[in-house]
Image: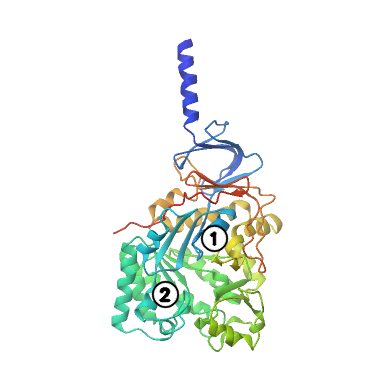
């Protein structure tokens, strides 16, 4: 009997040693099961090995008393895909950041260039915008067209070439098809529908910046109807990006329309970021004559991202010719708050920081929701916010990218992509004047089982991030 007891103790000790990382006494919150209780979480081999009611032992044990442990945040709309951006994203609780709106015109190269260099997980879509720019030989200086790619209708031969580009990107594992239709207004509805048809052949979802903004004619509702119709015709999943900056004052009607489409079984989702300003390239067609009426603002509401200066009638044409990022202070506060709190609306940053300049959403989106909208304003519950940041984005993708079924949730066997934060102190610190200030309150971040943030300090040398990629065909 004594010998059996010794064997039992040795087996228990060996089992404990096989846990690479343990968080004890955490408030574990899982949006899928609804679990919200003090638990102890053990990680082994990049996955959650156990969630226990009793404390665990392992190679590294962290006391997480008073902290929330949740699935790491998944950002479906992150233009910033280099280490400068990933460092800020990690401090904001993000474990996966994907470029799905604009996407890439060379998916294979995009993934190859980032292999072994990721702080967090990343992935990209096959993009209609870059395909159109290449096929129509647009010489624009930015990531959206400002010449032929925006302003000229495509021939049937050119549409065929774009379709081949999208098909090639999906064969190379692109995470869906990205569209920026407002930036390509000369693209006919037939051209867009043809790209949806390519996505349908692969079963890939579409991530769409709609054709029109606001309440001018044609309005944002017309644009939403266009892509819902295209999705219904082709049978693919549809995700409409940044519903607030596209809808502006019409956003409540857009949210209602999307909700009604979902109630009838159409797989349509949308997202928002928690700021009342947008950002884009000043040289884009968005600022063609008549933009003031469409956006509902004047030149004084535009801020040059590189310097923070407000534009004037004199500086606008000069800076537009130069080209660069401009911040548009135009989203009504009530619209922004409504979208953040609306059930089923995902949180996504639309962020990019370049040389410390840009929009604060690139650094503070997720902490801002948790600090301002959950803790301070009580606009939504903590569990609902976590679902919008982790589970719902994973579910949007998992049918096409099966590995996403292991993210955004907490159970044995799920990926060990975890955020551990202080719910009483988490907050965004980035401002329009200093957009690259890292968020505060994320105490630990685990990416693929590896600690990327530890005791609120970033391990900038870690590279545990992996490619999020659909099946290569």
Q: Quadrant of residue 428?
A: bottom right
Element marked by disc 1: helix
Which residue sits at x=43%, y=50%? 405
Q: Position of residue 199 (x, y in %)?
A: 35, 67
Marks 2,1: beta carbons within 8 A: no
The reply, left or right, for residue 82 in relation to residue 292 is: left
- Counting the numbered discs, the total is 2
Q: In the image shown, does 400 or 287 lie closer to the viewer?
A: 287
Q: In the image shown, does 187 or 304 lie closer to the viewer?
A: 304
Which residue sits at x=41%, y=74%? 129
Question: Which label number is shown at residue 84?
Answer: 1
Using the numbered discs, state the Cα–Cα distance from disc 2 to disc 1 in whole angstroms. 24 Å
Mark 2 or mark 1: name the one nearer the start of the chain: 1
| Category of crowding for the residue at label 2, using alpha-carbon neighbours closer than 10 angstroms: few (below 14), some (14–19), many (at least 20) | many
Locate the C terminus and report the quarter of the image it occupies. bottom left
| Category of crowding for the residue at label 1, using alpha-carbon neighbours closer than 10 angstroms: few (below 14), some (14–19), many (at least 20) | some
Which residue sits at x=59%, y=51%? 383
Q: Position of residue 287 (x, y in %)?
A: 54, 84
Tell us which disc is closer to us: 2 or 1: 1
In the image, farthest residue toward the top: 1
Q: Position of residue 257 (x, y in %)?
A: 51, 71
Q: In the image shown, does 329 or 435 lie closer to the viewer?
A: 435
Q: Position of residue 94 (x, y in %)?
A: 54, 55
Which residue corresponds to mark 2?
Answer: 129
Is residue 32 visible in this depiction of the protein? Answer: yes
Question: Which label number is shown at residue 305?
Answer: none
Is residue 298 visible in this depiction of the protein? Answer: no
* Relative to 420, residue 349 above or below: below
Element marked by disc 2: helix
* Relative to 420, residue 15 above or below: above
* Relative to 142, residue 371 above or below: above
Q: How is the image coloured?
A: rainbow
């Amino acid at each position: 009997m004594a010998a059996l007891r010794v064997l039992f103790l040795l087996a228990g000790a060996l089992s404990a040693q096989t846990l690479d990382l343990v968080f004890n006494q955490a408030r574990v919150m899982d949006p899928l099961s609804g679990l919200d209780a003090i638990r102890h979480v053990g990680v082994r081999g990049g996955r959650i090995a156990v969630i226990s009611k009793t404390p665990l032992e392992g190679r590294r044990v962290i006391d997480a008393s008073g902290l929330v442990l949740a699935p790491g945040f998944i950002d479906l709309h992150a233009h910033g895909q280099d280490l400068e951006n990933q460092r800020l994203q990690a401090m904001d609780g993000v474990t996966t950041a994907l470029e799905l709106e604009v996407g890439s015109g060379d998916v294979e190269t995009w993934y190859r260039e980032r292999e072994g260099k990721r702080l967090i997980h990343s992935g990209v879509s096959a993009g209609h915008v870059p395909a159109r720019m290449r096929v129509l030989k647009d010489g624009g200086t930015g990531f959206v067209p400002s010449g032929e790619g925006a302003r000229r209708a495509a021939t049937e031969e050119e549409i065929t070439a774009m379709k081949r580009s999208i098909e090639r990107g999906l064969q190379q594992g692109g995470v869906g098809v990205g569209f920026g239709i407002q930036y390509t207004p000369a693209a006919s509805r037939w051209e867009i529908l043809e790209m949806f048809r390519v996505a349908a052949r692969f079963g890939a979802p579409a991530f769409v910046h709609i054709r029109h903004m606001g309440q001018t004619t044609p309005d944002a509702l017309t644009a939403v109807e266009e892509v819902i119709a295209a999705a219904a015709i082709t049978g693919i999943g549809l995700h409409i990006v940044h519903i607030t900056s596209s809808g502006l004052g019409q956003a409540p009607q857009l949210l209602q329309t999307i909700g009604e489409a979902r109630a009838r079984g159409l797989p349509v989702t949308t997202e928002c970021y928690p700021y009342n300003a947008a950002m884009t390239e000043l040289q884009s067609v968005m600022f063609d004559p008549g933009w003031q009426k469409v956006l509902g603002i004047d030149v004084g509401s535009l801020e040059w991202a590189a310097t923070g200066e407000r534009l004037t009638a004199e500086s606008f044409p000069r800076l537009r010719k130069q080209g660069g990022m401009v911040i548009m202070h135009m989203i009504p506060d009530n619209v922004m708050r409504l979208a953040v709190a609306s059930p089923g609306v995902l949180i996504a940053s639309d962020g990019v920081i370049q040389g410390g300049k840009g929009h604060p959403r690139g650094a503070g989106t997720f902490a801002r929701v948790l600090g301002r909208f959950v803790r301070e304003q009580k606009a939504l519950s903590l569990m609902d916010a976590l679902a919008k940041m982790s589970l719902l984005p994973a579910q949007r993708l998992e049918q096409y990218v099966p590995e996403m079924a292991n993210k955004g949730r907490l159970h044995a066997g799920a990926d060990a992509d975890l955020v551990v934060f202080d719910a009483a102190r988490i907050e965004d610190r980035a401002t329009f004047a200093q957009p690259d200030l890292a968020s505060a309150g994320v105490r630990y971040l685990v990416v693929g089982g590896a600690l990327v943030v530890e005791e609120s300090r970033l391990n900038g040398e870690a590279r545990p991030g992996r490619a999020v990629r659909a099946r290569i065909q």
